[in-house]
Image (cartoon, coloured by chain):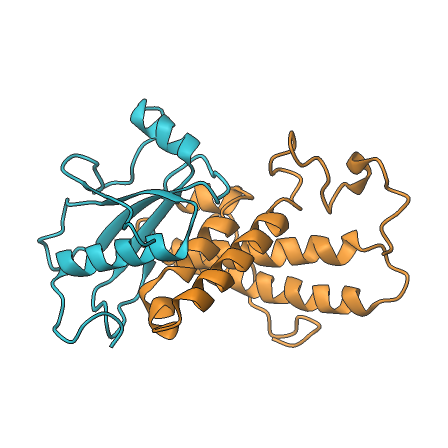
Amino acid sequence: MDARGRGRRAAPPGGVNGDRRSQYAQGFYDQAWSDWQAYGVLTRAKDLPRWHPLHYLQMACEKLGKAYRLRNPRADVDAIATRHVGFTQFINEFLRSPAVMADYDGQRARHKAVSKTSSALAREIEKLAPATDRTHSPENAEYPWEHGDWEKGTG
Amino acid sequence: MLFRDMPLSKEQAARVLADAHFGIEDGLERVFIIRAGLDDPREPIKLLEVNANTVPTGSVEPIPFSPSKDIPFVTEIAEISPEEFSRLERGELALPPGWTLEDADDVPRPRAA
C-alpha cells in the first residue's frame, strides 16, 4: 500500500465469510499502517494543532494492537473489534514474549528500561482515546476541548 | 543460550518465563502458571499476570506468542490489572475457555527481582 492508500484492501464488512478473524486482523493491520502514515504527514504539517497527529497515532496503535491480538484463534473478535483499550496490554505482553526475551539475552537492565519506557508511552497513547479513563484523564486527542484549553495545542 | 544449556520441559519453561517476567516488570504483582493443559503437547504455556502498570480492558484476553530457541513452546500471556484480578476472584470476570486458576501455580516473586 502506498501513502495515498492505493492497493489497500477493503475493510472487513459486517457479514464477512470465511475466516472472519483473519480478515479483521488484516483489515486492522492495513488501517493501522494507513493511520501511521497519516500521523507522519500531520506531524510535518506546519501550524496544525498537535491533537490531529496525536489522534492518528492513537488510532494506529489501537488498530495494530487489535490486529496482533486477533492472532489468537480463540479471540473474541467482536470484543476486540469494538473496544478502544488493549494497546498497553499488547505492548506489555509483547515485551515479555519469548522472542523478545531472547533478543535481550544477557541485557536484563536494558530490557527492563525499554519495557518501562514503552509501557509508559503506551499508557499515555492509550489515554488519548476519548473512551479511556475519562474520569482521571479527561484530555484526549479527539475532543481536546474537554481539557479546557481547546484554543491551545499548537505546541 | 538465554537460560540454560539443557532443553526445558514445558513446565520448566513456564517457570523460567514467570521468574524472568518478574525481573523485567516492577508492576507485576502475581504470575500464575495455568496447569490446565500443561501436560498436553498441543496446548500452549498459559500465564496469567497481574500487573499494576497496565490499563484494564474489562476482560481476560490471552495473546499467543511464537516459540523461541530457548522457550520452544507457544506461550499465551494474559495480563490483567489488580482490580480486574479482584473481580476475577469475586466471579465478576471470567477466564478464557481452557483456563482455570484451579491448581494454578502462584509463582512467588524471586527475591532478587
Judge left or right: residue B98 versus residue A72: left
> Residue A144 at x, y = what percent?
79, 42
Query: Camera-side residue: B22 or B40?
Result: B22
Name the residue located 67 percent from the left edge and 36 percent from the top edge.
Answer: A137
Q: Residue furthest top?
A: B90
Q: Colour of chain A?
A: orange
> Residue A129 at x, y = what percent?
65, 44
Q: Is residue A71 above or below residue B28?
A: below
Name the residue located 36 percent from the left edge and 32 percent from the top edge.
Answer: B85
> Residue A55 at x, y = what percent?
71, 52
Query: Camera-side residue: A19 or A33?
Result: A33
In the rendered image, which quarter is residue A35 located in?
A: bottom right
Name the residue located 11 percent from the left edge and 59 percent from the top edge.
Answer: B41
Chain letter for the part of the structure drawn in cyan: B
In the rendered image, which quarter is residue A109 located in?
A: bottom left
Query: Camera-side residue: B3 or A57?
Result: B3
Name the residue located 14 percent from the left edge and 66 percent from the top edge.
Answer: B8
> Residue A108 at x, y = what percent?
39, 66
Give the total number of marks visible in the rendering: 0
Q: Is residue A128 above or below residue A118?
A: above
Q: Is residue B24 visible?
A: yes
Q: Is residue B61 visible?
A: no
